[in-house]
Image (spheres, helix red, strand yellow):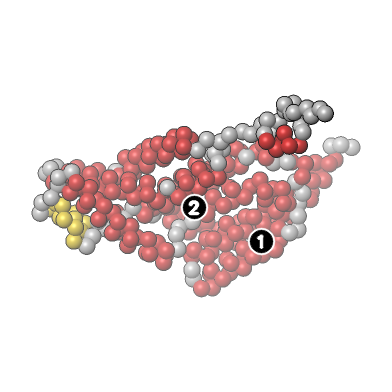
Amino acid sequence: MPAATPQFEIRKLLPVIALIGLLAIAFGPVLWDLFGIWESNPQYSHGYLVPVFAVGLLWLRRDSLRVERLRPSLWGLPLIAAGLLLRHVGGYVHIGWIEQFSLVACLPGIVVAIGGAEALRWSWPSLAFLLFMLPLPYRLEVALQGPLQRIGTVASTFVMQTVGLPAIATGNVIDVNGRRINVAEACSGLSMLTIFFALSTAVAMVSRRSLLERLTVVVSALPIAIIANVFRITLIGSLTFLGYDAGLVDAIHNWAALYMMPLALGLLWLECSFLSRLIVEEEVDPVRSPLASLAGISGYPTLDRKN
């Protein structure tokens, strides 16, 4: 008799499994487009790793899952319907980002349909992290590239001037002793910012430190990414000024990820080390706290009033 319970639970999940199959067919073209973007656009090549980390985050949070509370719920159906509506709207107005977002928007509904509120409580960080596998909306991408280009140009020129190089910036072009370096859109650092912001968020999610420290780590992704990009432009400018072969300079420019990401990770490690010393969490012993003495908890030395 006890063995019949798991079979009964599986039979209850059969409609959900069938629904997931139908959703996989409906979102097949969206997934195919995402794979194409990850493959062709270096800015979003990290998309392959995002689902892997999301699954790993589920594993790290396994102790918080109360299996006995998992129950299939019909409340997942409205959430799935909302995601499908977004899919239809995105296709109707021909905006790819809405279609891609609708894929992630459907996942909470599937989770609730399978395991109810308990499953959603356990998995929501992983579901939220999946947003990093989506490309930025076109207008946001364009809006970020211009300021990042300008910041990279001005900051790199300042660093080169500080170390004694004759660098002058005109627009987004840096003149180093008559040799011009064009800080193009591809050199804006947006790719580095996108990847490192996802990585910083991942570090914050798995960290056991305070909320303030984790928020600081996420916010610091922007200045750290800018510093890494300024280092790259300054390095290219210095090599150009010193007269190194153009092929070598181009190779170092193209291999930027090999040294920009280790540099950013090193800065992130230094930041986390500094925060761990700056912010110290104290564990308050309820027996030895002032509130305990007021409440008269046994074990805390109190004055014995005697007349």
User: Which residue is located at x 50 percent, y 43 percent?
Assistant: 213
Mark sitting on residue 286:
none
The amino acid marked with disc number 1 is Ile
User: Which residue is located at x 52 percent, y 60 percent?
Assistant: 100
Which one is nearer the viewer's eye here, 66 or 79?
Answer: 66
Q: Is residue 245 left or right of residue 77?
A: left
Mark 1 = which residue?
80
Which one is nearer the viewer's eye here, 170 or 104?
Answer: 170
Image quarter in which the N terminus is found: top right
Q: CA distance from mark 1 to mark 2?
A: 20 Å
- Percent x, y for residue 127? 59, 51
* Structural crowding at the residue carrying mark 2, measured as other residues with C-alpha within 10 Å and reported as few (<14), some (14–19) or many (≥20): many
Which one is nearer the viewer's eye here, 192 or 200?
Answer: 200
* Structural crowding at the residue carrying mark 1, measured as other residues with C-alpha within 10 Å and reported as few (<14), some (14–19) or many (≥20): many
Q: Is residue 222 left or right of residue 184?
A: right
Mark 2 = which residue?
132
Which element type, helix, strand or loop, lies under badge 2?
helix
Q: Quadrant of residue 74?
A: bottom right
Q: Quadrant of residue 87?
A: bottom right
The amino acid marked with disc number 2 is Phe
- Percent x, y for residue 28? 56, 58
**Is residue 81 placed above or below 71 in the rendered structure?**
below
Which element type, helix, strand or loop, lies under badge 1?
helix
**Is residue 81 placed above or below 3 in the rendered structure?**
below
- Percent x, y for residue 166? 13, 50
Q: Is residue 186 left or right of residue 53?
A: left
Q: Is residue 247 left or right of residue 191?
A: left
- Percent x, y for residue 126? 58, 47
User: Which residue is located at x 18 percent, y 43 percent?
Assistant: 163
User: Which residue is located at x 56 percent, y 71 percent?
Assistant: 89
Asked if one can make out residue 4 in the rendered structure from this viewpoint, the answer is yes
